[in-house]
């Protein structure tokens, strides 16, 4: 067993080292930069296969979007009364995933959780790519994409102005802000590491590109002072966003009058779900990566266990929210609300509901057992379950509420067509293409930050 | 270690940021100003199959608009008159005019004259002439001084913003119902008070999309 996978006994006096194997400053730089410095022709075969697969899926996605714009959203199964289906399910799914990155980078930073340094770069990259995937869906579901500028307050001869009372507009601004701040945060954190790469690479073009994006970083004391301050400010700016963005996403539903959407529990329930799904996705991506990239000393079993604990906490919150929704449906005495929830659990979409409950309520409870939450295999499998469950949660919320509305004569069982899975899989293609490029060409671990938390930081000899 | 970039590149971010702001504002301005119907539509004056002059008929002869545009008070469209309406007079007046040859042909063959429409509103905008006449909006408000035009020319942009200008503040365009087709009528002080009161009773769609886009 690799020393990074070993579960150590809790030492109450002295905390265990975050980084194992006695790695020094130079070892970390070498380990992290290895992938980016591999010459193009010596690229690892596994990466090439993965990239080919992801890029082909992305191509399929782009073609599918082209066809959608050409033909219209009628190619999907969305029809009365279910006008929102997989398009919005995918949107909420991806935005939710994006939340882990900001939580790790901002909130854990403000709480001085040093273990975040091993995973923050990776999680932030995931956030950015997930939010890109998310933004595509509302963009393409509007049907007439050429008038998408209606979203923005631009002076025009139609006197057309966005409706600031609409939660859909708040949503656009919330997710847009979130993307901008996350990107800035990620990029600011990257600057010192990009400078390291700039100084190390031999290739002229690579030197130029890394040089361009490292903004002339020299690592002087003055640079560090400004950098630390900027990082702290960005962390403070992003912290409220972790809570606000998914709250606003939940308003898309909560401000409607549809039973099953119109509940005050929605904002916290959505935020907990988002963090839950985000951490699951970090696990799904991190567990294979630490193996393939040889990062077991940097991302140790301690990190994995910590993330599993967060999954356990947020998963329990989500389970509680499911329960309280049922309670409120009964307690409100509103027959429509009660019907919607009974219909969710025992109606035509019961299969989706119980998939959701199994994946989101039961699986995270297994993490109460230390043996399970410190097992790499179990963590990986359960993280996949959570991903599936959280997709189904959005499906259950959106489709079960819509397909049986107030008027029984308009009830209609929603069935997706062939195009819906193509769009969902296609968005994964986009996500993984970006991700593989990130893994290949950028430092996946925040080297500069890691060096601040290693135990033997004293053997500094540069 | 040698520098990768020469010193002048220090200015690049500032210049890039400034250009970004200028280019974005510029693009919005170009679309807002040059691509608007004020610039692209106003002045449209196609050559009609018959050189019919509104100046002679409505101006000099003083014919009422409704003699030809019969639908204006009752229906959504004002209507282009059939050839028979022309022939009411022109079977006796200037019966041999060369300019009127297409009208006589149309009358004989029973095929309509292919008039070219000047005032167009998109299909997705629901415009009703009768509602506007009933609200006492004069023809001149949207069509300009037709009685002075030899050939009809588009005077107003007919853009959504232009519609909304009046929908938000219809008062200056109101007039007594019997003056609706009068091109030369000007309000007096007395009328202004009446118009103010009348404007309060009208509720043209302003912010509700489905008022005009049904």
Image (cartoon, rainbow, N blue to C red):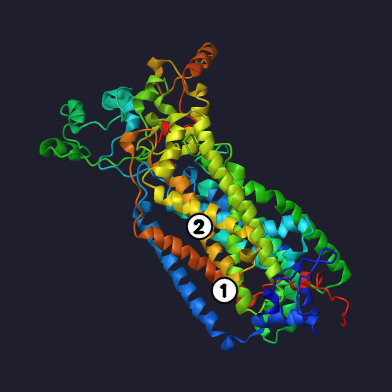
**Residue under circle 1?**
A436
The residue depicted at 58 percent of the width and 36 percent of the height is A264
For the residues labelled 1 and 2, the Cα–Cα distance comes to: 20 Å
* Snapshot quadrant of residue A234: bottom right
The residue depicted at 46 percent of the width and 34 percent of the height is A337
Disc count in the image?
A: 2
Q: In this view, does A50 lie above or below A364?
A: below
Dot 1 and dot 2 within a common chain: yes
Query: Where is residue A150 shown, x and y percent of the image?
Result: 51, 46
Residue A242 circle label: none
Placement of the N terminus of chain A among the 4 image quadrants = bottom right
Relative to A55, A302 lies left or right: right
Specify whether residue A402 is in view. yes
Query: Where is residue A126 shown, x and y percent of the image?
Result: 61, 64
Of tags 1 and 2, the one toward the viewer is 1
Q: How crowded is mark 2: few (under 14 residues within 10 Å), some or many (20 or more)?
A: some
Which of the chains bears the disc numbered 2?
Answer: A
Along the viewing direction, whichever of A203 and A459 lies nearer the viewer = A459
Along the viewing direction, whichever of A52 and A390 lies nearer the viewer = A390
Placement of the C terminus of chain A among the 4 image quadrants = bottom right
In the image, farthest residue toward the top: B190
**Residue under circle 2?**
A136
Q: Is residue B18 above or below residue A39?
A: above
């Amino acid at each position: 067993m690799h020393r990074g996978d070993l579960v150590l006994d809790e030492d109450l006096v002295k905390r265990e080292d975050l980084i194992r194997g006695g790695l020094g400053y130079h070892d970390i730089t070498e380990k992290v930069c290895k992938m980016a410095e591999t010459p193009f022709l010596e690229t690892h075969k596994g990466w090439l296969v993965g990239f080919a697969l992801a890029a082909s899926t992305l191509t399929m996605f782009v073609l599918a979007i082209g066809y959608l714009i050409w033909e219209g959203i009628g190619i999907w199964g969305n029809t009365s009364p279910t006008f929102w289906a997989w398009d919005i399910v995918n949107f909420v799914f991806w935005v939710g995933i994006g939340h882990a990155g900001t939580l790790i980078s901002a909130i854990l930073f403000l709480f001085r959780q040093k273990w975040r340094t091993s995973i923050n770069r990776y999680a932030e990259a995931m956030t950015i790519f997930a939010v890109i995937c998310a933004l595509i869906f509302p963009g393409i579901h509007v049907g007439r994409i050429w008038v998408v500028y209606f979203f923005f307050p631009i002076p025009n001869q139609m006197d057309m102005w966005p409706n600031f009372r609409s939660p859909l507009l708040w949503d656009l601004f919330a997710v847009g802000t979130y993307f901008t701040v996350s990107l800035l945060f990620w990029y600011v954190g990257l600057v010192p590491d990009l400078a390291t790469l700039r100084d190390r690479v031999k290739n002229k073009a690579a030197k130029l590109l890394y040089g361009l994006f490292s903004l002339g970083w020299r690592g002087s004391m003055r640079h560090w002072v400004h950098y630390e301050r900027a990082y702290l400010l960005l962390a403070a700016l992003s912290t409220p966003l972790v809570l606000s963005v998914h709250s606003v996403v939940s308003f898309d539903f909560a401000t409607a009058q549809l039973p099953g959407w119109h509940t005050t529990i929605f904002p916290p329930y959505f935020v907990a779900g988002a963090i839950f799904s985000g951490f699951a996705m970090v696990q799904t991506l991190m567990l294979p990566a630490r193996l393939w990239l040889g990062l077991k000393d940097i991302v140790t079993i301690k990190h994995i266990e910590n993330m599993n604990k967060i999954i356990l906490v947020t998963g329990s919150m989500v389970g509680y929210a499911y329960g309280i929704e049922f309670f409120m449906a009964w307690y409100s005495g509103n027959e429509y609300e009660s019907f919607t929830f009974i219909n969710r659990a025992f109606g035509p979409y019961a299969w989706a509901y119980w998939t959701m409950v199994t994946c989101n309520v039961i699986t995270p409870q297994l993490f109460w057992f230390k043996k399970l939450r410190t097992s790499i295999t179990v963590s990986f499998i359960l993280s996949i379950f959570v991903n599936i469950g959280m997709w189904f949660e959005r499906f259950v919320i959106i489709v079960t509420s819509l397909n049986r509305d107030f008027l029984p004569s308009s009830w209609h069982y929603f069935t997706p067509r062939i195009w819906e899975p193509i769009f969902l899989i296609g968005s994964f293609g986009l996500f993984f293409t970006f991700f593989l490029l990130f893994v290949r060409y950028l430092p996946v671990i925040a080297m500069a930050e890691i060096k601040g938390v290693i135990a033997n930081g004293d053997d500094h000899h540069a | 270690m040698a520098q990768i970039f020469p010193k002048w590149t220090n200015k690049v971010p500032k210049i890039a940021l400034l250009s970004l702001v200028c280019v974005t504002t510029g693009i919005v301005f170009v679309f807002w100003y040059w691509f608007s119907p004020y610039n692209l539509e106003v002045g449209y004056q196609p050559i009609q199959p018959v050189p019919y002059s509104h100046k002679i008929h409505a101006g000099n002869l003083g014919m009422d608009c409704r003699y030809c545009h019969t639908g204006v008070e009752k229906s959504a469209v004002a209507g282009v008159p059939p050839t028979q309406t022309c022939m009411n007079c022109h079977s006796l007046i200037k019966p041999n005019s060369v300019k009127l040859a297409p009208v006589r042909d149309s009358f004989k063959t029973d095929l309509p004259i292919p008039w070219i429409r000047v005032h167009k509103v998109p299909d997705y905008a629901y415009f009703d002439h009768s509602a506007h006449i009933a609200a006492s909006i004069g023809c001149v408000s949207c069509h300009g001084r037709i009685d002075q035009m030899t050939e009809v020319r588009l005077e107003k942009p007919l853009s959504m913003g232009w519609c909304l200008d009046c929908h938000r503040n219809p008062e200056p365009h109101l007039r007594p119902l019997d003056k609706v087709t009068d091109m030369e009528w000007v309000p007096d002080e007395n009328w202004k008070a009446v118009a103010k009161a009348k404007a309060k009773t009208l509720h043209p769609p302003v912010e509700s999309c489905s008022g005009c886009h049904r």
